[in-house]
């Protein structure tokens, strides 16, 4: 018997050129709740997928209970006593709770005998851990909080001693999250080990015994929760990076160009993603929205740009309303002066199989200047693309090259050139520099500032806090679908970090 | 002819005509519930019917014929499985391809081997499934009402017909009461859930596809060994597609499949019997309308005008592990 | 969802891989010929000779090619929008109504060159109509287009059977067909075109609708790559998220695409009805709608690929007829096998040989390997 439930030694994993995990060492003591925090893309989920046998590490060893374990697939992980609650539930939606729990852990070829036993076992587990669910309820009819309980029960039913939870509170209401924490405490009391993956500092402080911090694929520190502070963790998470400096003068805000009032947006599951958000953006200013990914920024952008229907609220563009709750038409919004650089350029902002020049007109293909009679004027389109290629230094400078063959930074420049060169009144930008090389980042930032100085109203959403601070004239922080605070760019990283983690925002929003 | 007599005769031909539909639709049920769409039911049935006709004639053994039918159908299923599960190709394209390959090769091979214009030689009694006469069928024939029902409707069918009707509860039991069925239904809805539960998605889908092959094989054997005395060119005549329609019409459920196939079989039987017959009030119903009715009904159902047919959620999509 | 592959040079991507797939399909077909006890080489000789050996043969080959260009284009147009229109067979069949109506109404009074445009419109209209319903059902009700179009093939077969029986069949006639059209309903043969090459068309029904097919191929190229509509169709075919972002009306594009696809399929009816039989017969489509799937897959949905692919199948159909004449044990059903194998290897299994070919091609030339390595990520 070892006192360590899990020990990772030198885990290394690359996907192509992306080095997702670098020489990770981790010790998780038995009977503890061990938090793992880090920003998005820090490599937490990859690490846990390796531990659960979904991926194989390129190098390194996994020790379970002091013995080296060869975890080739989820089966081996289950056999080693590891259970996982995935961020996106792995449940069969039209199955009952009981069927989901049995799946893969049926005792015999014929279900009947097993069902009675499973029911009894489920009853016992429910009682032991205070996890009430109706075993005959169908998953799709249950609220997400209960669905998550089913995932936990699934792991317990397989006699997991070590439970991994990947961003478990992302889909939960605060009350549901509190309930989850009580369940985790209960699990700990029963001697189970819990690994909690999250980016929310508040949760780490509230419930974990120890916490490990990941940053850019590396494990940078492990602390005893009692002996650390939110400030220290925030700093470890973000790291002392060289601050981005962007030369910019004083903002000269003028008229309100975009006005959002009481906007509420739900996703396809009916979960409220944007909750009663209001703000104004004036000509000549950049308003940055800071927040950890998944707190409603994406849905906010999509609703404003007419891609996703909002539940309620109003949005005024240049003083006249956008039909955000009805049939807002992205094409019409473009004509009215709203340009949109979407967060996901691979699937939304670009068609990767198109030629560069074809992507340079996406959304503006109706423009008469690209038309010659009834046909598209290919020469005009290519000439136009060539102009933008020159202005934005897109490389290679070939409008006929397939878009997939451009690097991330150049792809982003294609989108930016298309949206910025239209002289819009309002520019909505999501993640302008995600997956973009350093040289291009600087260029893109300069362009955004130029847009501001030309008197555009700019709404900037980014999960890169540095970027938000460097570019914005005002910063709104979103947490759990709400704007929980407004700050100037001089606010410290720690202050913003606390707001983003939902620690201080609540009382402020209540005031 | 008195009404009751007509009823019995119609019912009996309904049972006969729906037998291959039931088997093929259940075949489709197994693969589609596992997330592999199959528009190749027609081809598999045809290939099986041909194999059964050939082997039963050569061996003079009906069981050998049945075995050959199942074997050929399973092999064709495996081709579909390889293309759509392993190679992650388009399931639709693969199904279309199999239908063509079989349609062509049954004629070419049949002609080459037997030289009877694409037919296999007529089978003697040994090479065919006989009719099973249930006990006392002759004795009770004269009993009013129940007599004809028993000896005219329940008795006197091919063993494969009884098998087909038995396969309905059996398939239900397999899908809903066994471990294999539970996993099969799960993999058609959310293969990720199956994968994370430590079960191989690929192997599970292959097994589902094999089940489909077995049932299609029996359906094909019924056509050439029971309903007819040997194989004739293109003898499935769209039954595979009708079965596909029945499967959708039944919303991918075993019990509904029975009723959908009986309904479609009845439409067929009715059309054959009442060709050109003028009904009171509605007059003459074109036989072509009756033939098209199963397809029309399926389209209407699929459009959600009479309830909604929701296909298995992961259907038609090859499984790729998410990163 | 494609497995990430190293990038191949264009000649391998668009030349070598389709050729290898085609070669495998033909190899297996050759095996079938062997099983039947005949010589595949001899069959190949008769095939080529039967398809191109004489002016008349070439005329027949091009007659079939005409048909397959139409149905191949129909499938390809839908493919570009991400739709699988498997209903070309039914749309072509219903398209026949338009041709028959035009010819039956005007063949006595108007010359062919006036009836022809009316028949084109009629064929396209009825074909489009038959595709409109599945398209609308997809756009508005979410019905699976593959299933609906299959069902519509069968519904079309029943409907046409009924119409030929009750409406089109002349009184007193026994066979299910319209009356034979007068001169106004007969398209002229392209004997002048053949004679330029010193060939005689003989009895082959190679007619002016071939030129229409070429025109349609050009039209489809213009539509897909030179119009806004085509641009929007391709955007949707690649990424519906990008289409929504660009403000493209998905429902509208689906319906229009299906109508164009159905219209092209319908125009196929001109060739056999006005060009060969001069009447509409039962089951005149003869599976050409399904051949269109193979043609579109082979031709990679590009008109420049579809025309040679249609020629290939035209050759198979005409040459196949010749084989069955010379080698009685190989009937025309051999073509159906080849067609199925082509669909299998060029369609469902198109990536099967890719890893091996990639290794081979990139192994041969170190320079391309480096490029592939940097692009591979």
Image (cartoon, coloured by chain):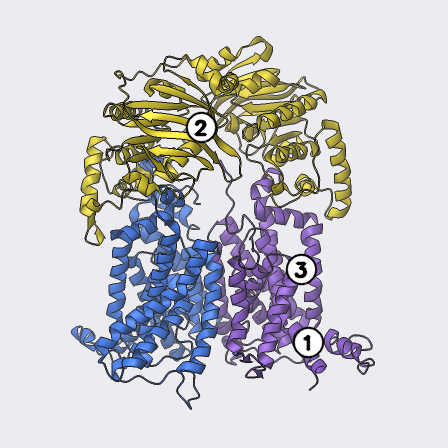
Chain colours: A yellow, B purple, C blue
What's the distance in space between the residues labelled 1 and 2, CA to CA?
Answer: 68 Å
Residue B62 in the image: x percent, y percent? 67, 72
Query: Which residue is at a point 22% across and 54% down the rendered structure image?
Result: A374
Query: Which residue is at a point 44% across and 37% down the rendered structure image?
Result: A310
Same chain, labels 2 and 3: no
Q: Quadrant of residue B236?
A: bottom right
Front position among marks 2 and 3: 2
Residue B130 in the image: x percent, y percent? 71, 76
Q: Residues within 10 Å of mark 1 (few under 14, many from 20)?
A: many
First in residue order: circle 1 vs circle 3: 1
* Circle 2: element type: strand
Q: Quadrant of the N terminus of chain C?
A: top left
- Residue ranking furthest to the left: C196
| Foreground pick, A135 / B235 | A135
Q: Residues within 10 Å of mark 3 (few under 14, many from 20)?
A: some
Q: Which residue is mark 3?
A: B255
Query: Residue C267, can we see it?
Result: no
The chain that hosts pointer 2 is A
**Circle number at residue A277:** 2
Q: Quadrant of residue A67?
A: top right
Q: Going by the image, does C207 lie left or right of A10?
A: left
Query: Which residue is at a point 39% across and 45% down the rendered structure image?
Result: C239
Q: Going by the image, does A383 lie left or right of A456?
A: left
Q: Going by the image, does A241 lie left or right of A8?
A: left
Up-down relation of residue C311 to residue B252 (above or below): below
Asked whether the residues under the numbered discs 2 and 3 touch, taking CB atoms below 8 Å apart as contact, a structural biologist would say no
The chain that hosts pointer 3 is B
Residue A316 in the image: x percent, y percent? 35, 33
Q: Quadrant of the C terminus of chain C?
A: top left
Q: Which residue is mark 1?
A: B12
Q: Going by the image, does C35 lie left or right of A364?
A: right
């Amino acid at each position: 018997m070892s006192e360590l439930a899990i020990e990772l030694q030198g885990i290394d994993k690359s996907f192509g050129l992306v080095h997702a995990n670098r020489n990770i060492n981790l010790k998780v003591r038995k009977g503890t709740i061990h938090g793992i925090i880090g920003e998005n893309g820090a490599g937490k989920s990859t690490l846990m997928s390796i531990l659960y046998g979904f991926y194989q590490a390129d190098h390194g060893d996994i020790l379970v209970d002091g013995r080296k374990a060869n975890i080739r697939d989820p089966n081996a992980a289950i056999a080693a006593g590891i259970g996982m609650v995935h961020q996106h539930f792995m449940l069969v939606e039209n199955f009952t709770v009981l069927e989901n729990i049995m799946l893969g852990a049926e005792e015999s070829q014929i279900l009947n005998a097993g069902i009675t036993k499973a029911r009894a076992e489920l009853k016992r587990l429910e009682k032991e851990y205070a996890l009430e669910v109706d075993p005959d309820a169908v998953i799709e009819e249950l609220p997400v909080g209960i669905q998550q309980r089913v995932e936990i029960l699934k792991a317990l039913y397989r006699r997991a001693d070590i439970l991994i939870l990947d961003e478990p509170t992302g889909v939960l209401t605060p009350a549901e999250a509190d309930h989850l924490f009580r369940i985790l405490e209960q699990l700990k009391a029963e001697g189970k080990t819990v690994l909690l993956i999250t980016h929310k500092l508040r949760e780490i402080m509230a419930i974990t015994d120890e916490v490990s911090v990941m940053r850019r694929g590396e494990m940078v520190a492990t602390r005893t929760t009692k002996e650390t502070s939110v400030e220290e963790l925030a700093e470890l998470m973000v790291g002392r990076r060289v601050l981005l400096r962007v030369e910019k003068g004083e903002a000269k805000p003028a008229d309100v160009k975009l006005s959002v009032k009481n906007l509420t947006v739900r996703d396809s599951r009916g979960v409220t993603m944007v909750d009663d958000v209001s703000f104004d953006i004036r000509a000549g200013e950049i308003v940055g929205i800071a927040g950890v990914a998944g707190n409603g920024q994406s849905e906010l952008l999509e609703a404003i740009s007419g891609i996703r229907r909002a539940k309620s609220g109003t949005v005024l563009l240049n003083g006249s309303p956008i039909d955000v709750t009805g049939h807002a038409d992205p094409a019409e919004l473009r004509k009215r002066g709203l340009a949109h650089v979407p967060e996901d350029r691979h699937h939304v902002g670009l068609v990767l199989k198109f030629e560069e020049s074809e992507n340079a007109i996406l959304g503006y293909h109706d423009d008469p200047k690209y038309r010659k009679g009834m046909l598209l004027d290919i020469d005009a389109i290519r000439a136009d693309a060539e102009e933008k290629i020159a202005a934005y230094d897109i490389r290679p400078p070939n409008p006929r090259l397939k878009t997939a063959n451009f690097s991330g930074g150049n792809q982003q420049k294609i989108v930016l050139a298309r949206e910025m060169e239209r002289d819009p009144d309002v520019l909505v930008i999501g993640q302008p520099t995600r997956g973009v090389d350093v040289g291009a980042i600087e260029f893109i930032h300069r362009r955004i500032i130029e847009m501001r100085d030309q008197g555009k109203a700019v709404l900037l959403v980014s999960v890169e806090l540095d970027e938000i601070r460097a570019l914005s004239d005002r910063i709104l922080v979103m947490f759990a679908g709400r704007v929980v605070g407004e700050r100037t760019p001089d606010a410290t990283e720690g202050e913003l970090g606390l707001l983003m983690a939902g620690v201080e925002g609540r009382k402020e929003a209540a005031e | 002819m008195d009404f009751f007599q007509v009823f019995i005769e119609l019912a009996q031909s309904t049972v006969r005509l729906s037998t291959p539909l039931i088997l093929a639709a259940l075949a489709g049920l197994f693969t589609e519930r596992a997330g592999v769409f199959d528009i190749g039911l027609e081809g598999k049935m045809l290939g099986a019917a041909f194999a059964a006709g050939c082997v039963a004639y050569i061996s003079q053994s009906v069981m050998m014929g049945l075995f050959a039918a199942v074997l050929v159908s399973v092999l064709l299923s495996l081709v579909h499985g390889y293309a759509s599960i392993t190679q992650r190709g388009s399931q639709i394209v693969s199904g279309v391809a199999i239908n063509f390959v079989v349609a062509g090769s049954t004629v070419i091979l049949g002609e080459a081997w037997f030289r009877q214009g694409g037919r296999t030689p007529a089978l003697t009694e040994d090479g065919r499934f006989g009719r099973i006469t249930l006990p006392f069928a002759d004795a009770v024939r004269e009993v009013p009402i129940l007599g004809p029902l028993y000896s005219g409707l329940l008795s006197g069918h091919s063993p494969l017909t009884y098998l087909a009707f038995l396969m309905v509860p059996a398939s239900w039991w397999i899908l809903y009461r066994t471990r294999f069925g539970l996993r099969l239904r799960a993999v058609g809805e959310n293969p990720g859930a199956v994968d994370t539960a430590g079960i191989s998605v690929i192997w599970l889908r292959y097994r589902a596809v094999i089940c489909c092959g077995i049932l299609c094989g029996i359906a094909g054997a019924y056509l050439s060994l029971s309903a007819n005395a040997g194989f004739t060119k293109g003898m499935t005549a769209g039954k595979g597609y009708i079965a596909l329609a029945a499967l959708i019409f039944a919303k991918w459920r075993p019990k509904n499949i029975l009723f959908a196939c009986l309904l479609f079989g009845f439409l067929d039987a009715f059309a054959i019997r009442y060709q050109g017959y003028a009904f009171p009030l509605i007059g003459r119903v074109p036989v072509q309308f009756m033939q098209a009715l199963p397809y029309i009904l399926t389209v209407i159902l699929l459009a959600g005008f009479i309830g909604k047919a929701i296909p298995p959620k992961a259907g038609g999509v090859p499984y790729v592990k998410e990163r | 969802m494609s497995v990430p592959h190293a990038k191949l040079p264009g000649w391998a991507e668009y030349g070598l891989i389709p050729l290898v797939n085609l070669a495998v399909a033909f190899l297996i077909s050759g095996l079938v010929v062997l099983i039947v006890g005949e010589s595949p080489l001899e069959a190949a000789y008769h095939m080529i000779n039967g398809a191109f050996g004489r002016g008349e043969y070439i005329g027949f080959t091009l007659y079939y090619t005409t048909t397959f260009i139409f149905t191949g284009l129909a499938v390809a147009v839908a493919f570009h929008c991400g739709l699988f229109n498997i209903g070309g067979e039914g749309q072509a069949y219903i398209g026949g109504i338009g041709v028959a109506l035009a010819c039956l109404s005007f063949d006595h009074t108007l010359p062919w060159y006036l009836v022809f445009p009316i028949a084109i419109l009629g064929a396209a209209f009825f074909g489009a109509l038959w595709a409109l319903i599945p398209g609308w059902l997809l756009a508005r009700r979410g019905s699976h287009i593959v299933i609906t179009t299959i069902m519509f093939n069968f519904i079309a077969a029943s409907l046409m059977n009924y119409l030929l029986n009750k409406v089109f069949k002349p009184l007193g006639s026994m066979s299910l067909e319209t009356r034979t059209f007068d001169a106004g309903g007969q398209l002229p043969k392209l004997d002048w075109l053949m004679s330029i090459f010193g060939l005689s068309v003989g009895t082959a029904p190679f007619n002016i609708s071939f030129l229409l097919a070429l025109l349609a191929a050009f039209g489809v190229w213009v539509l897909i790559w030179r119009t806004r509509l085509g641009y929007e169709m391709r955007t949707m075919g690649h990424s519906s998220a990008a289409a929504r972002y660009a403000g493209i009306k998905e429902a509208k594009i689906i319906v229009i695409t299906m109508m164009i696809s159905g219209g092209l399929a319908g125009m196929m009816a001109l060739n056999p009805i006005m060009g060969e039989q001069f009447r509409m017969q039962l089951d005149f489509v003869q599976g050409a709608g399904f051949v269109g799937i193979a043609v579109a897959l082979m031709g990679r949905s590009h008109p420049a690929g579809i025309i040679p692919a249609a020629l290939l199948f035209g050759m198979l159909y005409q040459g196949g007829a010749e084989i069955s004449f010379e080698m009685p044990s190989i009937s025309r059903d051999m073509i159906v096998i080849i067609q199925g194998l082509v669909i299998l290897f060029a369609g469902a299994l198109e990536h099967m040989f890719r890893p091996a070919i990639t290794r081979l091609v990139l192994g041969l030339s170190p320079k391309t390997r480096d490029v592939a390595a940097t692009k591979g990520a």
